Amino acid sequence: MDKWLSHPTAIKIVSLALGILLWAVVHFDPESRTPSSVASLLENRTINDVKVVAVGLDERNYVLREITPQKVRITVRGTRNDLVAARTSDYTVQVDLGSLTAGTHTLPLRSDLPRGIQSLAVSPSTVTVTIEELQTKEFEVQVIPEGAPKAGYKAGTPVLRPTNRVHVTLPASEMERVDHVGASIKIEGADATLKDKTVKLVAYDAKGRPIEGAVIDPAVLELEVPITNPFKTVPVRFKLTGSLPPGLSISAFQPETDKVTIYGPQNELDKIDFVEADVRLNELTKSGKVAIPLGGLKNITEISPKELAINVEIVLSSTRSLQGLPVTIKGLGDGLVAKITEPATGKVDITMQGAPAMLDKLQPGDVTVEADLSGRGPGTYTVPLRVSLPRFINQTGGHVTITVEIAPDVPATTPPGESPTPDLPAGGSPDGTPAPGDGAGTGGADSTNDQTKTEG
């Protein structure tokens, strides 16, 4: 045997046989089978509950409202290996909705199967679809606060950015259900403004229930909710203290605002009707703008502005005198009459100092002189005068007191057929001039010519 294998001819024969065998292995095609053999290798399979997928719908203008049936059964054929390798999710059935408009349509199905598997049947082979047109409508967003801010604080009007109006898209049959578009935000216990909050928008029906499927554009907005103390706007009253340096007077006093806003608990705000600003005249030496600080209000957390700017004009003073000013008697008891005995005319003279322009405009009616006789019975009294002058004009001379005689009121007997004499004011006659024979003299007519003015 060894001798035969070592023979050259035997080696050539064996080599040729091996070459033919290798060529046959390389060129063998397992697919080149006869039809009868291939058919014997394929299997049929039925796939149930394959979901129908809608494609091609113009979703900007339409919505698929219904598809019947939603699942179908398909029968397929393939090799055992291909059928085993395919998953149920690999089998899809599609319905083409391209170019369709609103309405109900019956359409054929087409299957999309894994490679190597062919469709034999789809049951049912058609589906019925209902397509509805979409509508878009604009709504104003309503912000719904949840909870309450910290005690003593108030929530202001919410501010939405970049807009407070949005567009809602829904099928035409559902659009009428939309009552409003809302955004909710929690403000429970807040004591400062809520800023840069992002809120999601929801469409609600009239009962406050969210509407499913509503497309809102934009879907989110930025929200700011002012949280402030309760506030109140009140006028400013100026309290003048001290006095200007000698020889100076105020000719113009113009605040840039006469109202301020105060913040605090509501019960404290209800007690305040005005804010008082202290103006220290001794600190005013020249014309210009003066800042007056405001504050000192109990239980008030903030005042705005915190100081008040006043434009002040200061000039050299002048003086002016008014003669024969009537005196108004106040507080005289019932059943008593009063008569001014000093000055005898029953009228007084007043010397005033102020800015020249203010003094030039001053009229006798701008000055009131009063004497208070409250609590005094019959007798003779020296009573101080209370002189009311326009702001920034001061009394520098003239009468500061008067002498008054108080007596019981004895009614005069009126002869039959005569009218009673009307009550006379202090001084005698109805016009305030002394009655003839009372020793007071005249002076009512002269007083209008006795007004003098002297420059100081």
Image: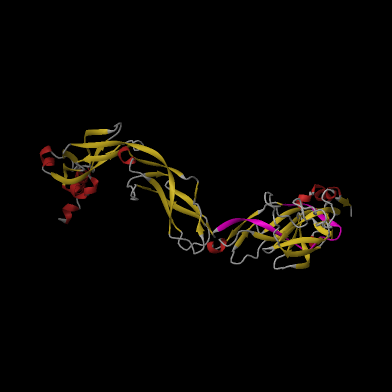
Determine which quarter of the picture holds residue 117: top left
Up-down relation of residue 430 to residue 279 (above or below): above
- Name the residue located 21 percent from the left edge and 36 percent from the top edge: 128
Q: Nearer the viewer, residue 220 or 34?
A: 220
- Name the residue located 49 percent from the left edge and 45 percent from the top edge: 163
Q: Position of residue 3 (x, y in %)?
A: 17, 54
Residue at the limit of the structure toward the front, as seen here: 416
Q: Nearer the viewer, residue 125 or 256?
A: 256
Number of labels in the image equals 0
Q: In this picture, which residue range is highlighted in magenta?
A: 231-254
Up-down relation of residue 235 to residue 69 (above or below): below
Task: Tell me if residue 246 is in the magenta stretch.
Answer: yes
- Name the residue located 43 percent from the left edge and 60 percent from the top edge: 147
Q: Position of residue 367 (x, y in %)?
A: 77, 53
Q: Report the predominant secondary structure element of the magenta stretch.
A: strand
Q: Position of residue 84 (x, y in %)?
A: 18, 50
